[in-house]
Image (cartoon, rainbow, N blue to C red):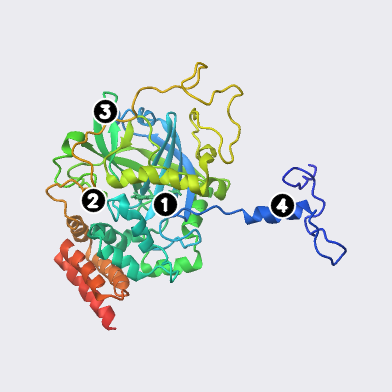
Amino acid sequence: MSQRVLTTESGAPVADNQNSASAGIGGPLLLQDQHLLEKLARFNRERVPERVVHARGSGAYGHFEVTDDVTDFTHAEFLDTVGKRTEVFVRFSTVADSLGGADAVRDPRGFAVKFYTREGNYDLVGNNTPVFFVKDPIKFPDFIHSQKRDPFTGRQEPDNVWDFWANSPEATHQVTWLMGDRGIPASYRHMDGFGSHTYQWTNAEGEAFYVKYHFKTNQGIRCLSAEQAAEIAGQDPTSHQTDLLQAIERGVHPSWTLHVQLMPVADAAGYRFNPFDVTKVWPHRDYPLRRVGRLVLDRNPDNVFAEVEQAAFSPNNFVPGIGPSPDKMLQGRLFAYADAQRYRLGVNHTRLAVNAPRATTAENYGRDGLMAANSQPRYAKNYEPNSYDGPVETGRPLAAPLAVSGHTGTHAAPQHTKDDDFFQAGELYRLMTEDEKKRLVANIAGGLSQVSRDDVIEKNLAHFHAADPAYGKRVEAAVRALRED
Ligand code: HEM
């Protein structure tokens, strides 16, 4: 095979890739050295803004296969036949730290799935926890500020983390989750995934159902203790990436079984708590899990930057048969993601290979913008309506309409009989074994005891008391013991 030649960006052969061109042997460098200028300039532009949250992550391709008939509940094409396979790309992530952070940390994990369906890409952008810390998107930037590095100290500050939670009682359920054993998964393969929010499915008759998604890991749940995590994070900050990459390269393909919970739309208004509140789960005794299919990851991306860093998931990418619920957090997310991606990657990020539809093509009149590649036929019109056979609307809404009532305003969520912020945190605590409770209490006390203000500590303790008096008492005793040390 003949030796391949190194070239400049414009394709001209490069004479020397070891020595810059200089004026004389020891002299200053020449502006005419195109290869040097291009190399330095290109290097300076290798980074794009990292994701404002979930910056650090790992991705893989695979497929989703339908194992059970759900056509009574949704007419989504990729779910319409048992045995049908759809290509997927999944990105797992940590949330709070930056791109260079460690994987083995106490933090929720992102679990984002892009289904490349024949009716467009469907993005299910979830976490490894079934609930979230806040329930209104207006609180999200404040929440994230309190968990990321402080603008003055440049560190994650226990004062900020716990101050936000002290003033956000609705976080108690998720805090209990995060401080428990599942707060530090051993790897991305050994954790479940959840859509967390309530979504809406519509069947072929136009009948609507509310739905929650659960991906159950087939590798089994494995978690790390705080001590194990600290050691691993120090030795291999990329431990989750290493694990996923190597498992797939070895041919050990991780898989998850997808289940859903389905609620008839008519149940929602009379349910004992707000079913669109993302700080709460639906008990399985009310809405049992129903199996849908299997997600398998079997191929690593060829290039992490091109395919993982530039991957763009948006909760607003729905396909016919699936739509949003009135969950206020979800509604905020419908805006936030594509907006972040237009800033982070540019308006044409939708045309990148990892983000573009694969089982169909995008056909619209959106044109131009930064980095547009000319992918339109020569005579394609860039306006609609037109008389030239351009693409036209279907007239068929993707999902059933949501009924609304009342007046506009900055309302708190609709009131249901049991909407308090603590009872599910208490139920989660009581489900734990004695050993799990011990570790939960120790983890909370370890963080809370570092807080400098007594009133912030007291407010947090009150939340654990409200969840379960025994839980509150134990956390209080553990915090006091650590502060007296
Ligand atoms: C990433 C906003 C709540 C899961 C992001 C990004 C933004 C964002 C701006 C970065 C997107 C990008 O640059 O590509 C918000 C807002 C929220 C919210 C405004 C609340 C109103 C949630 C919730 C979940 C979640 C409740 C899980 C149930 C994720 C995941 C990613 C992400 C998994 C990473 C996606 C990827 O791998 O590229 N979020 N988020 N977020 N968010 Fe949220």
Count of labels in the image: 4
Q: Looking at the image, which residue is at 31% across and 60% down? A: 178
Q: Depth-wise, is mark 1 or mark 2 nearer the camera?
A: 2
Q: What crowding class fits label 2: few (fewer than 14 Cα within 10 Å), some (14-19), or many (20 or more)?
A: many
Q: Of tags 2 and 3, which is closer to the observer?
A: 2
Inspect the image, locate mark 3, and give the three-letter code of the amino acid beneath it.
Answer: Asp
* Location of mark 2 (residue): 280
- Using the rendered image of the protein, determine whether residue 300 is visible from the camera's viewpoint: no
Q: Determine the CA span between mark 3 and mark 4.
A: 58 Å
Residue that numbered label 4 is attached to: 38
What residue did someone put label 3 on? 72
Amino acid at circle 4: Glu
Read off the residue under disc 1.
189
The earlier-in-sequence mark between 1 and 2 is: 1
Residue 249 seen by the camera: yes
**In the rendered view, does 126 fall on the left or right side of 413?**
right
**Labels 3, 4: front one:** 4
